[in-house]
Image: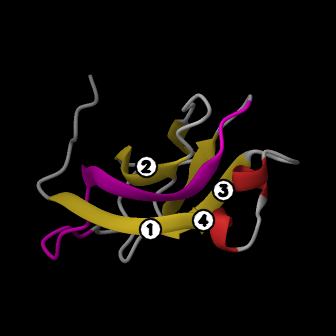
Amino acid sequence: MKRIASSSVGILQGSRVLFADFAVGGMMWTGQGERESRHLVTFAEAFVAPPTVHVSISMWDMDNQHNARADISAEHVSEIGFQLVFRTWGDSRIARVRADWMAIGAAKDEDDWQLY
């Protein structure tokens, strides 16, 4: 269990279209090349420590003639941001994906101060 030892808890959230490969014949749609998409998310305000980040697929457009395979995760989480990572493999053809995220963690408070 992650315990937040702060008098102030911050929650940030966002949404991002990761790619729209059907429109440009990209790798996720053609199945050729690297089947990974990485995006740097920078928080609007820094957390005190790396927050817990939850990511989910909020929209996907998949080819119905092939298996639907998807993996989405948050990697390299820090106080200032994280990498949003989407992967697929095999014969999956993905036209586009939108991901939503939520970060929860200790936040700076105006009453927080240090003597030295």
Q: Residue at x 25, y 67 (%)?
A: 108
Q: Which residue is mark 1?
A: 16
Q: Is residue 67 magenta?
A: no
**Image: magenta residue range:** 91-113
Badge 4: residue crowd in 10 Å (few <14, some 14–19, many ≥20): some
Q: Secondary structure at mark 2?
A: loop
Q: Quadrant of the C terminus?
A: bottom left
Q: Which residue in the rendered view is the most extreme toward the right?
A: 33
> CA–CA distance between discs 4 and 2?
27 Å
Q: CA distance from mark 4 to mark 3?
A: 10 Å
Closer to the camera in the image, 104 or 90: 90
Which of discs 4 and 2 lies nearer the camera? The answer is: 4
Q: Where residue 23 appears, x then y in whole percent? A: 65, 73
Residue drawn where x is 73% and y is 32% of the image: 91
Residue 38 badge = 3
Given the image, on which type of amino acid does mark 1 rest? Arg
Residue where numbered disc 4 is placed? 19
Q: Are marks 4 and 2 in contact (CB under 8 Å)?
A: no
Q: Residue furthest top?
A: 1
